[in-house]
Image (cartoon, helix red, strand yellow):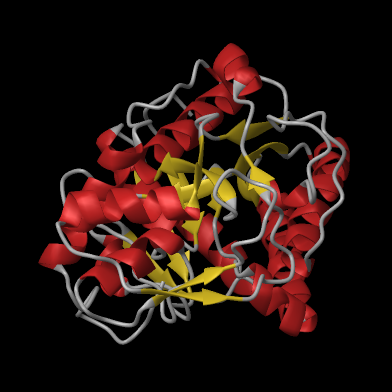
Amino acid sequence: MADNSGTVLITGGAGYVGSHVAKALRTAGYETVIFDNLFAGHSEAALGSRLIVGDITDVDSVRKAIRESGAVAVMHFAAWLSVSDSIKDPLGYYHNNVIGTLATLEAMATEGCHYFVFASTCAVYGEPHQLPLSEEHVTEPISPYGQTKLTIEKVLPNFEHSYGIRSISLRYFNAAGADPEGELGEDHSPEIHLIPRALAAAIGKTPIDIFGEDYPTPDGTCLRDYVHVSDLSSAHILALKHLVSGGASNIFNVGTEQPYSVKEVLAVVERVTGYRVACHQAPRRAGDPAVLYASAERIRAVLGWKPSYPDLERIINDAWQWHQKHPDGFTNDNHAG
C-alpha cells in the first residue's frame, strides 16, 4: 500500500474519534470503509465513507468486510470507553473491548491484513508515579476500562510473531474539540466528557458535576491533558505510514504535555461561549487519578507528530462552533457515539 493509497477498515468509525480519523484519511487520499454496529455511533458521521453495519465480536462479519473491501489495514476504535461504567459492568467491557478486539485480530490474521492501529488510552497507567507520563511508566490500571486496553496491548506482540500483524498503539489522553470545518463533532448519549457537558450546561441544559474538589492540585480539581481530535487524527495517519514503510511496532502517547484543571476548563468554556457554566460539587469518582498528562517525546521523535491545535481555547472554540450548529447532535439516526 502506498503512503496515500489503499483501503483502511475503520472499526467504530461512526463514533467520535473514528469519524474524524476517517475524514482525515479520505483527505489524505486513502479509501475508507467504516465497520460499526451503531450502538455508539452515527450513520450521519460516516460522511463519504462506505458504512458496513456489523459487530466486531462476529469474526465472519469482520472477515467479510476486510475481504470485500480489500482492506490492508485496520484502525480500531470500537471500544466502550467510560471508566465509571467499566467499574459497574466489567463483564460487558471485557466482552466488547477484549473479546471484540481479539475477534477483529483473528479476522485480520485469517484474511492476511497486516497493519493494525489501536486506539488505546492513558488509563493503562493508573496512578502516576512521575509526571509527565512516558511510555516507560509502569502500567497499573485502576479501572476495568484501562485493563481491557492494556490486555490488548500485551497480546499484540503475539499476533505479530505468529501472524505478521504489525501494530501501533496510541495511548490517548483526553480527546476533545471538533472538526475545524464543522462537519463532525462529539455526540455521546449520555455524554460523559467534560467539554461537551460544560458547553451544554452553558446554554442552560443539565448543570455539570465537578467530581471532587479536594484533590492535591492547585484548585482541588483533577488535571488533564486535552488533545484536539484533529491532532489525534494526524497521529493515526502518521502511525499507518510508519507501519506501511516498514517501521517497527510501537506504543505512543498522544497528548499536548499541558494539563488543565476542571475549573480552568470551565473558565475557558465561559470565556468562549459568553455564558456562565452551571455546576454542582459532587464526590470523587472511582478510578480518577488526580493528575494525568503526557510526555509526547517518543511520538515526536519517531513519527514526527506535533499538535497543530494545542491551545485549549481553540479546542473548546471548535467544539462550541459544532455544538451551536448541532444543538441536538447528529439528527439522521437515533444512535449516540
Q: Is residue 32 visible?
A: no
The foreground one among 332 and 208 is: 208
The foreground one among 167 and 79 is: 79
Q: Split into 4 quadrants, where in the image is the C terminus?
A: bottom left
Furthest-left residue in this view: 325
Residue 70's spot in the image, x, y percent?
Answer: 48, 49
The foreground one among 205 and 271 is: 271
Query: Looking at the rendering, which quadrant does residue 291 occupy?
Result: top right
Residue 179's spot in the image, x, y percent?
Answer: 25, 48
Name the residue at 23% across, 59% down: 47
Residue 114's spot in the image, x, y percent?
Answer: 66, 39
Query: Looking at the rendering, which quadrant does residue 278 occupy?
Result: bottom left
Vertical relation: 55 (above or below) 49: below
Furthest-bottom residue in this view: 334
Query: Looking at the rendering, which quadrant does residue 206 occupy?
Result: bottom left
Vertical relation: 305 (above or below) 274: above
Number of numbered callouts drawn: 0
Residue 308 left/right relative to 306: left
Residue 38's spot in the image, x, y percent?
Answer: 43, 78
Residue 285 left/right relative to 234: right
The foreground one among 224 and 155 is: 224
Q: Is residue 286 visible?
A: yes
Name the residue at 71% across, 33% down: 133
